[in-house]
Image: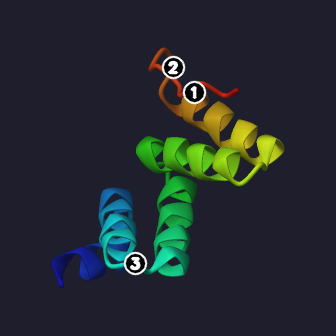
Amino acid sequence: MCWELAADRGDAPSMFNLGALDNEQGDAEGALAWFVRAAEAGETDAMRLLGSLLEGEGDAEGARFWYERAEEADPGREQPDEG
């Protein structure tokens, strides 16, 4: 798959897409791993998604971390309601 090759070469949007694909296929663990890699590589959508996922799991500190990283990387873009 082209996304896998691109992700292996460090392409953050491809990592995010692979996470979305794993998520659609019901592989939550694989999706989370790809979303973390994408976020760590600078993909702001992945940062926001991780914030939302962690918030949903009750991890306010982890959610705040990723929301703040996303804001630093992409200032001014609307953040999800952090509750």
Disc 1 marks which amino acid? Answer: Glu
In the image, residue 37 above or below residue 59: below
Report the Cα–Cα distance between label 3 and label 2.
32 Å
Tell me if mark 2 has few (under 14), some (14-19) or many (20+) residues whose alpha carbon lies within 10 angstroms of its own: few
Q: Are marks 1 and 3 in contact (CB under 8 Å)?
A: no
The residue carrying mark 3 is 26
- What residue sits 54% from the left and 73% below the top? 33
Quadrant of the rendering where the N terminus is positioned: bottom left
Q: Are marks 2 and 1 in contact (CB under 8 Å)?
A: yes
Tell me if mark 3 has few (under 14), some (14-19) or many (20+) residues whose alpha carbon lies within 10 angstroms of its own: few
| SS under mark 2 | loop
Tell me if mark 1 has few (under 14), some (14-19) or many (20+) residues whose alpha carbon lies within 10 angstroms of its own: some
- Return the residue nearer the eye: 25 or 45: 25
- Return the residue nearer the eye: 75 or 64: 64
Q: Are marks 3 and 2 in contact (CB under 8 Å)?
A: no
Of the image marks 1 and 3, the number of the one nearer the N terminus: 3
Report whether 36 appears left or right of 8. right
Q: Residue furthest top?
A: 76
Report whether 28 appears left or right of 16. right
- What residue sits 58% from the left and 44% below the top? 52
| SS under mark 3 | loop
In the image, residue 32 above or below residue 48: below
| SS under mark 1 | helix
- What residue sits 34% from the left and 73% below the top? 7
The residue carrying mark 2 is 75
Colouring: rainbow
Quadrant of the rendering where the C terminus is positioned: top right
- What residue sits 82% from the left and 42% below the top? 61
As drawn, the label of residue 71 is 1
